[in-house]
Amino acid sequence: MDEARVRAALKELGQPAYRWDQVRRAVYDQAAASYEEIAGLPPETRRALAQRAPILCLTERRVQVSPDGRARKALLTLSDGKVVETVLLRPSPTRWTTCISSQVGCAVACTFCATGLMGLSRSLTPEEIADQVLFWRQYMRREGLEGRLDNVVYMGMGEPFHCYDAVAESLRRLTDQKGLAIGSRHVSVSTAGVAPKIARFGREFPQINLALSLHAADDELRTRLVPLNKAYPLAALAEALKTYLKETNRKVFFEWVLLKGENDRDRDAEALIAWLKDLGPAALLHVNLIVYNQTDTPHRPSSEADARRFQARLLAAGVKSTVRQNLGRDIDGACGQLVVLEKAG
């Protein structure tokens, strides 16, 4: 929802200033999906607002639900007809998390990521990014899902730091206590390694979690898996992260998709341990290991046993590590599987 547009529309309609507060509470606190649900607004005002300032700038095309009900993937149509995917996850009985997109497609072209195979169509606006969270809150209310959506991860389609300004504005909207009111420490932004933006992110959003899609700790392998490494090699990332850690004293999460015979070997674990050693305090470094989710790429997934062996080497060296749950794999909604190959219509 575009607050400025709603406020302007209310003013043009001759409505008193308190009408905005009525709208704000209904949309953000009660997940109202239409102005017709806001009983305090005059009927003619509801109809006019629906035309001039829709609550959502995107529309639902399809929602897929995993058999166990712990993952849902939505295909959303934007105002220009382009489409984007976003995911709702229930990692535990009391927690809901959404994985949101910042771009239609992605220009980074990581070789194991379906989104990267799309190429980049365009970046999303701040409203399009934040409205994915609002959409899921409305969906949860409509479907009668218990609990509250209060965890957001920018790990969907796109590279958030390639559209930094739009992402920054969307973060302000998400964390606005009179808006979506997501706690800053319940928000994570993942980058494939746009080094110049890391320090800026730390200065502007010191309480929001930073994740780095690392996947390899030597330049030759990382450049092959994550072509962005050509522009920002590991040495540049290390310097940016040292600055970030020094200025924020906040934990950094490293994502490592395990690819059979490519980055899941003992020497890969040792390279990672050595690279992390000089970044900062071990307590501020955490590696999330992700068993590769099969997409239309030549890579093969490591086994669960491979993942546990890799994790054991990290833990033995004092590196904190978790083997992450792959919720949504059965609906192509897990890490690296988001892709739009069809046109809206």
Image (cartoon, helix red, strand yellow):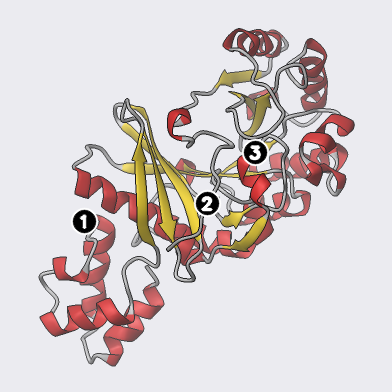
Q: Residues within 10 Å of mark 3 (few under 14, many from 20)?
A: many
Is residue 200 something that shows in the picture?
yes
User: Between residues 209 and 82, which one lies in front from this camera angle?
Assistant: 82
Report the amino acid beneath label 1. Answer: Gln
Is residue 172 something that shows in the picture?
no
User: Between residues 233 and 118, which one lies in front from this camera angle?
Assistant: 118
Q: Position of residue 343 (x, y in %)?
A: 50, 59
Q: Is residue 53 above or below residue 216?
A: below
From the image, tell me which residue sits under label 1: 30
Q: Nearer the viewer, mark 1 or mark 3?
A: 3
Q: Secondary structure at mark 2?
A: loop
User: Between residues 25 and 225, which one lies in front from this camera angle?
Assistant: 225
Of pointers 2 and 3, the one earlier in the residue sequence = 2
User: Between residues 306 and 185, which one lies in front from this camera angle?
Assistant: 306
In screen coordinates, is 205 left or right of 135? right
From the image, tell me which residue sits under label 2: 101
Q: Residue at x 43, y 34 (%)?
A: 331
Do the CB atoms of the residues marked 2 and 3 lie less than 8 Å apart?
Answer: no
Q: Position of residue 304 (x, y in %)?
A: 57, 12
Q: Position of residue 142 (x, y in %)?
A: 20, 49
Q: Residues within 10 Å of mark 1 (few under 14, many from 20)?
A: some
Of pointers 1 and 2, the one earlier in the residue sequence = 1
Q: Residue at x 42, y 63 (%)?
A: 345
Report the amino acid beneath label 2. Answer: Ser
Report the amino acid beneath label 3. Answer: Cys
Q: Nearer the viewer, mark 2 or mark 3?
A: 3
The N terminus lies in quadrant: bottom left
From the image, tell me which residue sits under label 3: 113
Q: Is residue 275 above or below residue 339?
A: above
In screen coordinates, is 284 left or right of 47? right
Q: Secondary structure at mark 3?
A: loop
